[in-house]
Image (cartoon, rainbow, N blue to C red):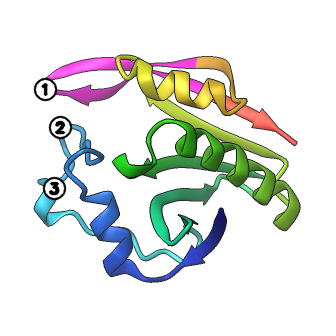
Amino acid sequence: MTFTRSFDFELIGEIMRHPALYQADDYGPAREHFQPRQDPEIRYVLVEDAGDVLGLFILAPQNTICWEIHTRLLPLSWGKRAAEAARGLIAWLWAETFVVRLVTSVPAPNRLAIRFAERAGLKRFGTNLASYQKDGTLYDQVLLGISR
């Protein structure tokens, strides 16, 4: 399994717009109009395994040592390969960067994503109350993180 920072915004956009992955809040664009942000601070890390592009991880620094992570793994990776990719990405970050803390926020109704993060080693550390709106309803977000 390999992890590579990508600047291929066409491929990044294709992955992020995949129908099984794209989930905008009430104020996000329609899937077909979404474009990934081309901010040099954001790291789009492609995951490949045995010739397959499994998806990507989006990493955005909150500061030099604490980065926020979001996952966009394609359906062909779901299951064992996705779990391996998540654990592998964390090990890769610890080896290749100065990052000492990864954090994420997951809308509380997305229990599958919360369990996925926990299986990768992230621990719940808080709740961001009424901070995500979908279909007119406000939801809490679960805050999770892992430290080197």
Residue 130 appears in the figure: no
Which callout, 1 or 3, points at the residue further toward the start of the chain? 3
Residue 118 in the magenta stretch? The answer is no
Q: Which residue is mark 2?
A: 26
Which type of secondary structure does the marked residue at label 3 adopt?
helix
CA separation, marks 1 and 3?
A: 15 Å
Q: Is residue 105 above or below residue 101?
A: above
x and y, in percent, of residue 39 in the image: 48, 74
List the residue tagged with mark 1.
135
Q: Quick check: 3 left or right of 132? A: right
Circle nearer the N terminus (3, 2): 2
Q: Main secondary structure of the magenta part?
A: strand
Of the residues shown, which amino acid type is indicated by label 2?
A: Asp
**The C terminus lies in quadrant:** top right
SS category of the residue bearing label 2: loop
* Residue 7 or residue 53, whichever sits in front: 53
Q: Is residue 5 left or right of residue 129?
A: right
- Range of residues picked out in magenta: 127-143
The three-letter code of the residue at mark 3 reads Arg
C-alpha span from label 3 to label 2: 12 Å
